[in-house]
Image: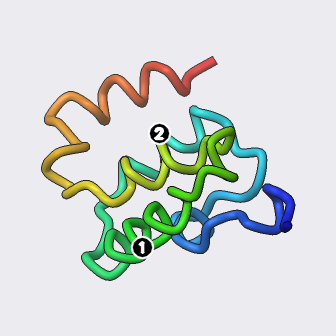
Amino acid sequence: MLTLQERFPLSLKRLGLSYGFSMKEFRVAMSFLRSDELRQLAHQEWESEQDPCYDNSNWRWYLSYVSMTNESTVDVYYHLKLKNNLEP
């Protein structure tokens, strides 16, 4: 069986994330619009994570979020909240 690092989803890599990313890095990546192709890839990867042997994997949550429509994950105030949270 592959390790979590070896199974790191391609869709997350395409968002600019790498293994061990932080929630802040994920939020920054999610502030960009995602193509239909990327969202479909994330959904396919999410489906492949449904095997019970991956029950302790947190990729499912991230992949489900990446696979959502842009309208479902980005609101008008998101960028303002993000900017405030990224400042030291």
Mark 1 residue type: Gln
Instruction: Say above or below: 41 vs 67.
Output: below
* In this picture, residue 80 sits left or right of residue 69: right
- Which of 28 and 67 lies nearest the eye of the viewer? 67
**Residue at 77% over, 45% down:** 20
19 or 2: which is nearer to us? Answer: 2
Q: Which residue is mark 1?
A: 44
Quadrant of the image for the C terminus?
top right
Q: Amino acid at mark 2?
A: Arg
Indicate the secondary structure of the residue bearing disc 2: helix
Q: Which quarter of the figure has residue 32?
A: bottom left
Of circles 1 and 2, which is in front? 1
Labelled pair 1, 2 in contact (Cβ < 8 Å): no
User: Where on the picture, by quarter, is residue 37?
Assistant: bottom left
Give the image location of residue 10, x and y in percent: 60, 74
In the rendered view, tell whether residue 45 sits above or below residue 70. below
Neighbour tally class for label 2: few under 14, some 14-19, many 20 plus, Cα within 10 Å: few
Q: Would residue 49 be found to the left or right of residue 34 on screen?
A: right
- Depth check, front residue: 73 or 44: 44
Residue found 20% across the figure and 28% down from its top? 77
Q: Could you say where residue 49 lies in the image, as x and y percent from the top left? A: 55, 59
Q: Is residue 79 above or below residue 12?
A: above
Single out the residue that lies furthest toward the front.
Answer: 52
Q: Position of residue 74 (x, y in %)?
A: 23, 43
Tell me the number on the disc at residue 27.
2
- Whichever of labels 1 and 2 marks the residue nearer the N terminus, that label is 2
**Residue in the image at 42% along x and 29% along y:** 83
Label 1: element kind: helix
